[in-house]
């Protein structure tokens, strides 16, 4: 079994300091949360940036500053910016961080309701457009699937030559509008992707650690973080992203699954050898 790749989704675009005071907004807060997650065992940081008032932005300049500062503290961590951004942003706005010489980014593989009146739109043409740009820029997409139809979309686009090997999926389960994260949901998705692919699972809210445990036992990889879940246990807010990462490390230890360094994660994901010169 491969070592376990832990991704930490440190802020997202939706959660606020009212939800959990450790949700980072400023550049310094964002860099510090990324660094602490890395020290706790995260090989990948899934990155959204915010304006100082907490509103989400996909500003290239903001990403550039944050990425540079993260690199100063932990230059080997894999930085995976979001191309999902926030509901309502258009394609080119969302794609701004892909201009920054990054190795990896999310690619959202279908449309879904996102709570209340929100719809997170990712049409087939959007997905082709994003996949093409990421391919041109040598960026490995993390194929975010919020339900089974999104996996079917990926497999169809892979067959048609719009999405390339190696394919690395992320099952994001428990969004209000997507698929839930019960055990049966996990196995249904896991069995729906080719054996040659890698996957990570991101459980939203109460699903975070139950899904992490299933993936750890199954040989998959895990994403945790305040973007997905605010609590370290029922009713107890996490005191920062590092607590969530540490909890996954403890579960991994229970199952004798070693945690991958960023270098090992690059090998597992077939990312090019990290060359600091080529990256910001
Ligand atoms: N904020 C959500 C609308 C991604 O990062 O690619 C989209 C999202 C997915 O967070
Ligand atoms: Zn995200």
Image (cartoon, rainbow, N blue to C red):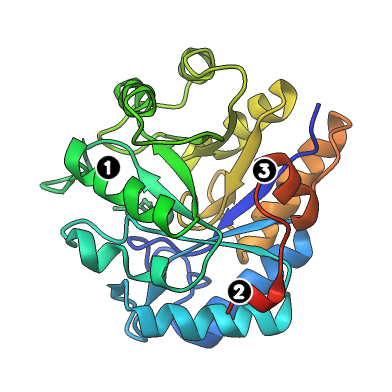
Q: Nearer the viewer, residue 49 or 255?
A: 49
In the picture, the quarter occupied by the C terminus is bottom right
- Please report whichever mark, 3 or 2, sits nearer to the chain's N-terminal start: 3
Q: CA distance from mark 3 to mark 2?
A: 17 Å
Mark 3–mark 2 CB contact (< 8 Å):
no
Tell me the residue at 77%/37% (across/down). Answer: 251
Residue 123: tell me if it is visible: no
Which residue extends farthest left?
117
In the picture, the quarter occupied by the N terminus is top right
- Judge left or right: residue 264 versus residue 223: right
- The residue carrying mark 1 has its beta carbon less than 8 Å from ligand 1: no
- Judge left or right: residue 115 versus residue 57: left
The residue that label 1 is drawn on is 127
Find residue 187 and report its horizontal and vertical position in percent.
53, 14
Q: Which mark is residue 150?
A: none
Determine whether 266 is above or below 177 in the image: below
Tell me the residue at 74%/23% (across/down). Answer: 217
Find residue 245 and report its horizontal and vertical position in percent.
69, 53
Q: Nearer the viewer, residue 74 or 196?
A: 196
Q: Which mark is residue 279?
A: 2
Q: Nearer the viewer, residue 202 or 233?
A: 202
Residue 240: tell me if it is visible: yes
Mark 1–mark 2 CB contact (< 8 Å):
no
Give the class, few, some or many, for how many residues have Cα within 10 Å of label 2's Cα (few <14, many ≥20). Answer: some
The residue that label 3 is drawn on is 270
Tell me the residue at 68%/73% (across/down). Answer: 35
Tell me the residue at 47%/19% (across/down). Answer: 189
Q: CA distance from mark 1 to mark 3?
A: 22 Å
Determine whether 102 is above or below 256 in the image: below
Q: Nearer the viewer, residue 223 or 15?
A: 223
């Amino acid at each position: 079994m491969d070592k376990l790749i832990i991704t930490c989704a440190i802020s997202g675009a939706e959660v606020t300091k009212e939800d959990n005071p450790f949700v980072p907004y400023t550049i310094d807060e964002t860099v510090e949360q990324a660094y602490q997650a890395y020290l706790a065992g995260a090989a990948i940081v899934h990155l959204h940036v915010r304006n100082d008032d907490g509103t989400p932005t996909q500003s290239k300049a903001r990403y550039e500053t944050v990425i540079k500062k993260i690199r100063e503290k932990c230059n080997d961590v894999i930085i995976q910016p979001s191309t999902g951004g926030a509901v309502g942003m258009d394609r080119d706005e969302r794609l701004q961080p892909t201009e920054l010489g990054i190795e990896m980014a999310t690619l959202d593989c279908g449309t879904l309701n996102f709570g209340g009146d929100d719809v997170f739109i990712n049409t087939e043409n959007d997905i082709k457009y994003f996949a093409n740009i990421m391919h041109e820029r040598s960026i490995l997409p993390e194929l975010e699937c919020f339900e089974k139809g999104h996996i079917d979309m990926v497999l169809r686009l892979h067959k048609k030559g719009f999405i390339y090997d190696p394919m690395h999926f992320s099952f994001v389960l428990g969004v209000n509008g997507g698929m839930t994260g019960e055990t049966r949901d996990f196995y249904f998705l896991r069995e729906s992707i080719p054996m040659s692919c890698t996957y990570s699972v991101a459980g939203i809210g109460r699903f975070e650690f139950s899904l992490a445990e299933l993936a750890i036992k199954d040989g998959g990889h895990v994403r945790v973080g305040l973007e997905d879940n605010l609590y370290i246990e029922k009713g107890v807010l996490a005191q920062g992203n590092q607590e969530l990462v540490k909890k996954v490390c403890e579960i991994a230890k229970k199952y004798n699954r070693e945690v991958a360094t960023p270098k090992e994660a690059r090998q597992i994901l077939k990312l090019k050898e990290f060359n600091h010169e080529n990256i910001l």
